[in-house]
Image (cartoon, grey):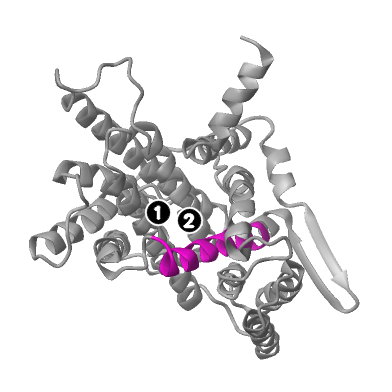
Amino acid sequence: MSVSTYIDRARAFFASDAAPGALLVFAALMALVFANSPLSSSYNEWLAIPVSVQFEDFSIAKPLLLWVNDGLMAVFFFLVGLEIKRELQEGNLRRFDQILLPAIAAVGGIAMPALVFVSINMDEPDLLRGWAIPSATDIAFALGVFSVFGRSLPLTLKLFLLSVAIFDDIGAIVIIALFYTSELSTLSLAVAGSGLAALFLLNRMRVSHQAAYFIVGMVVWAAVLKSGVHATLAGFAVAWFIPLKVNNAYGKPMLRQLEHDLHPWVTLLILPVFAFANAGVSLVGVSLETLTHPLTLGIALGLFVGKQLGVFGFSWVAIKLGIARMPEGANWMQLYAVSLLCGIGFTMSLFVGSLAFEGQGAAYNDAVKLGVLMGSLVSAVLGSWLIVRMGASDRSPAAPELGQPARAV
């Protein structure tokens, strides 16, 4: 094959829904390789590189790992905020009948993993801070698996999965704000509040220059970082003041254009960098006792057992009671398979885990990473296997032959 053919295939891959999930897996594998090789010391030293920014008396000094978690992930949450705002006002979440089932499923998907975790760690009060770790779903990873294996599933299930993950993100943001906030600085919060007020005025005045929102948004992020509230919440808050129906200086809808421009950077760079920086766990000395530690087990079973019980169980009750409707064209087994994919926590679970046990030492962090990797992997493998098996059993003489193109999702 020619070079141009390889380039075209590469472009097609990076443009597909499967690319973000594949890159996340690759980044996590590389982190594990680095953490369990002679390069482990270099890997840890790289994460600990001190980076500082200073303007007069104001300074931000953090190791590189925290710049990734507090800085790059703020951009991720900014994109999440843009997507949620658009979906609520113009997209799949604008109608009550469209959001009811995924909203109910997401409530179960947050509550049941937390209950599973707490039941396992009831006698370990120091570990209960991690109750929210298995409650998150990784949108990029889950949609990547769906795109690779779910071509035989109806499109409505993809929208269901996406909507559940969006509600999960909203729940994670609320949890971070309420339960993982340290001692607050009144002055910094006042500066952040003033910045949000300025963004509100820019929005109401229909200012079309994105630079104005960027400059004020950076002030808000820095103030929130210093306030004791986690800095990623600044990204989510700023997104809600980006105008949806105002064109930018280039004549394009500002919010949609920002979402379009940021999406590849976040999914193909920021999230893989986060995975590489946070998924590295040393497997030296890992034993059955390590794998069955209450923290590791609580997270793994919370993701694998709690998520499917919550998402599928709450959906089943809602549909049977007539509160919500089954996604069009789907059946119970397909809905269950997608519920399994909701147990892929990965990025968000690692992120919440880094907040829950921040400063608690390597043993806690390693247990969190092992639990997240185990629960996410089993959920992804079993969900994929079930989807593939259903696709094979659905083939009949009347079905399209193998040579025909698959239906796009």
Q: Is residue 129 visible?
A: no
In this rendered view, identify the residue nearer to me: 249 or 230: 249
Q: Estimate how packed mark 2 is, as few (under 14), some (14 to 19) or many (20 or more) residues with alpha carbons within 10 Å.
A: many
Q: Earlier in the sequence, mark 1 or mark 2?
A: 1
Where is 332 relative to 188, above or below? above
Q: Bounds of the magenta span?
A: 70-91
For badge 2, the amino acid type reads: Met
Residue 74: give x, y in percent of width and height: 62, 63
Tell whether position 90 is magenta. Answer: yes
**SS under mark 2:** helix
**Image location (x, y in percent) of residue 239:** 58, 69
Looking at the rendering, which quadrant does residue 12 occupy?
A: top right
* Numbered circle sitting on residue 137: 1
Residue at horizontal 38 percent and vertical 47 percent from the top: 344
For image coordinates 20% across by 50% down, the residue present is 328
Residue farthest along the front direction in this orientation: 251
Report which residue position mark 2 lands on.
348
Instruction: Tell me if residue 276 comes above or below residue 134 in the rendering.
Output: above
